Amino acid sequence: MDKETNDQQRPKVILTGASGYIGHNLMQKLIEDYDVIALSRHGDSHEDEEHVEWRSCDFYSMDDAQESLQGADYAFYLIHSMMPTAKLTQGDFEDMDAILADHFARAARKNGVKQIVYLSGIVPDDVPEEELSRHLRSRLEVQRILESSGVPVTTIRAGLIVGPQGSSFPILYKLVQRLPIMTLPTWTRTKTHAVALDDVLNSLKNSLGNEDVKGRAVDVGGPDVMSYKEMMQQMAEVLEVKRRFIDLPLLTVNLSRLWVTLVTGAPREMAYPLIESLIHPMVAHSDLKVEGISDGKITFKQAARDSLEEEKKKQEDAERKQRESSRNEESKPTQSEEKVAKADVRSVQRVTLPEGKDARWAGEYYIQWLGKAMLRPFIRTETGEDGVSRIYIRFFSKPILELSYDASRSSHDRAVYRITGGMFANAKDAHHGRLEFLMIPGSSDCVVAIHDYMPSMPWFLYKYTQAKLHLVVMYAFRKHLERKGSLGKSSTSKKAGGSVGTPSSLEAKS
């Protein structure tokens, strides 16, 4: 009876990225005290278990976000967009991260979430924000977008997380494992505060429901503060191999991005932004430390040994499963594989609107500009009383695209147009596609995004014609807006310049 009562009182926690590196490991700790609502793009492929309910969620969809966060008391935000999720992805990860954070923030507020715990990176305090790497600027922007919801946000900031899989540590390990001689540019002498995965997981869990850390950023780190060169030397000791390190008096970050991806095989979409951040010292600040959360206990060497042991066990398990599956007949594609195989498109670009303009204005103005200014000799646009905008090629009687304004999903800071037809859209799946204009809280930046668009023309032809033309059009639209009048306050995007404030601008929304 006591156990039953205790189970009924367990708080419910949203865990985004539950099938990922951090999320999967964090879940094992959370289920000791919480009921977990595990979110993943392919949550349907997982089975529920005691204290874990799986839900499928695509945070590029506002509807999905609001539905998936229902019934939660707290939420972990562990989302990033460095790896593409559509067959064709056009745009910078910073702009996609802004969309994901905005949708999550709105959904959290609408569902009455009491606290958001967000895992970010340590930010150097002596570097102007506009000079930070793209990755760190984006992490700051995501924090501010989450805070703009009015829901208390706890931002846990960590440097290099030492654990199996993940992002930064496997790159370090593979460099030392594969290169007997390494030439080290000046960024390898930059100090960083490595922290073991288990210490980060404890910091995240201990922040949940903790009144002392609501509404603030907390830096975490392990007992060792070292340069990347020192970490490589210790990694060689853990691997019991001899390595020669040769210092170079150059800051070759761009060259480093290339050879690191070639040597380690890390995807460039993930590796490039991370390596760009290595020029900054990432050491926990004493004024941002909190007892019981900030101070990791596991040394770098011990964390590295533990990670390699765990990785070895996982590899052995995977090889065993592969041998077992090879005895069976080839199975049909899973639901997840079918989704990946779809010829869908996501294209995201950021523009800065003239002072006082909003997303609703941007959507209407873009459609008018498309037909009157940019492609006037070739394109014409019409908007009917039914709210449907039709885009025609001159002298064609049928529209190439039909955009239906969705008033129920739109507001002054978010305009949604459903792609409901046209010769260029796949008629069967056109209702899933949409064109959205989304304001970045606290700025005049507007993200213009095409989601789940299914072109009707052959994929190869689309990829090298219509997709490329869209990028040209969006570039021209951004330049047109810059010429149109004085620019408003911009966000952390390097393309737009400036910085974001921290108003609770979403409090009146959703």
Image: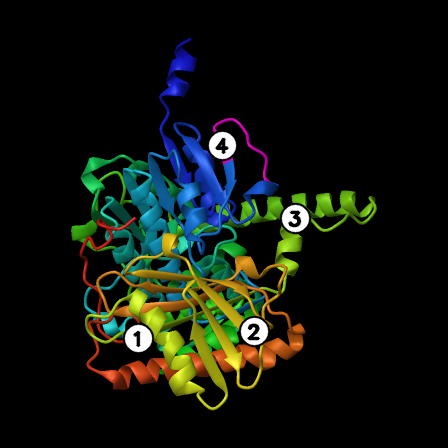
From the image, tell me which residue sits under label 3.
Answer: 335
Give the x, y percent position of residue 400. Answer: 56, 75
Queried whether the magenta region covers residue 50, the answer comes back as yes
Residue shown at 62%/55% (left/top)?
339
The front one of 398 and 214 is 398
| Amino acid on which disc 4 is placed | Val
Depth check: 10 or 479 in front?
479
Q: Earlier in the sequence, mark 4 or mark 2?
A: 4
Task: Give residue 494's mark.
Answer: 1
Q: Which residue is mark 2?
A: 262
Q: Which residue is pictured at 59% across the width and 81% down the height? A: 464
Examine the residues drawn in magenta and state their main secondary structure: loop
Q: Is residue 220 visible?
A: no
- Do callouts 1 and 3 mark residues in contact (Cβ within 8 Å)? no
Q: Amino acid at mark 2?
A: Leu
Residue identified by numbered label 4: 52
Q: Nearer the viewer, residue 462 or 58?
A: 462
As measured in the structure, the alpha-carbon distance from the residue carrying label 2 to the one carrying label 1 is 27 Å
Question: Furthest-front residue in view?
Answer: 385
In the picture, measured across the screen, residue 410 lies left or right of residue 291, that is right
Q: Secondary structure at mark 4?
A: strand
